[in-house]
Image: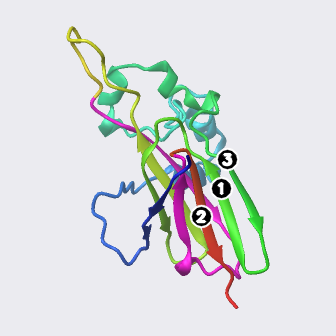
Amino acid sequence: MSHKTALEIRTDDDDHSQKWLLPLNEDVFSSHLSQAGEIAQKVFGEGSLFSPLLFGKFFDPADAFPLWDFDSELLLSRLHSSSKISVDWSETDDKYILRAELPVGARSVEVALCGDKENLIEISGIWNVGNPTGRDWKIRKWWEYGFVRRLEVADDADCRKMEASINNDNTLEIIIPKSL
């Protein structure tokens, strides 16, 4: 039997202090690096040992502690498709329908409108690898892993009226009516 769980749509008008904020993100770093000279490209570019994107995500030196517990599956996740969310979309006369398979174990999925553009949607969520079993564990991972996907929808989409739900615990469905 299938079940459907409705999700609340978050807008920038809402105050969510728990939202992750990074002043220098991957897009900003890539933009600065593309304007830099050849030496900076060699030192900080993709594939360099000094690249902040070495482990497939933006590396903040102030947050180096998670790297002490080296988990190759996590840090090299860009080599795998497990952390990528593919989104299928379809269109009818009056709405757009987006469907995304969520990563296994995903929870706390959030759908939000982003920034000043009203047609930019962000899908984000967190999951954890799992709890240790038995009573003999000595160390436990204390952080969770996440995913983010941003999508730009058509100009005639009315994102302020969109609805989101999770079907069968693994498929996110977002319905966006067209503005008439």
Q: Earlier in the sequence, mark 3 or mark 1?
A: 3
Q: Secondary structure at mark 3?
A: loop
Reply yes or no: does residue 67 show up in magenta. Answer: no
Around disc 2, counting alpha carbons within 10 Å, would you say few (fewer than 14), some (14 to 19), or many (20 or more)?
A: many
Around disc 1, counting alpha carbons within 10 Å, would you say few (fewer than 14), some (14 to 19), or many (20 or more)?
A: some
The reply to whether callout 1 and callout 2 are in contact (CB within 8 Å) is yes
The residue singled out by tag 3 in the image is: 86
What residue do we see at 31% from left, 34% from top?
143
The residue singled out by tag 1 in the image is: 99
x%, y% of residue 138? Answer: 21, 12
Q: Secondary structure at mark 1?
A: strand
x%, y% of residue 58? Answer: 47, 41
How far apart in space, not on screen, are marks 3 and 1 (Cα)? Answer: 9 Å
x%, y% of residue 31? Answer: 59, 55
In the picture provided, is 90 more to the left or to the right than 161?
A: right
State whether residue 108 is above or below residue 64: below
Residue 40: quadrant of the picture: top right
Q: Type of residue at label 2?
A: Ile
Who is closer to the viewer here, 168 or 54? 168
What range of the chain is rendered magenta? 142-168
| The disc label shown at residue 174, or none | 2
Q: Secondary structure at mark 2?
A: strand
x%, y% of residue 178? Answer: 69, 82
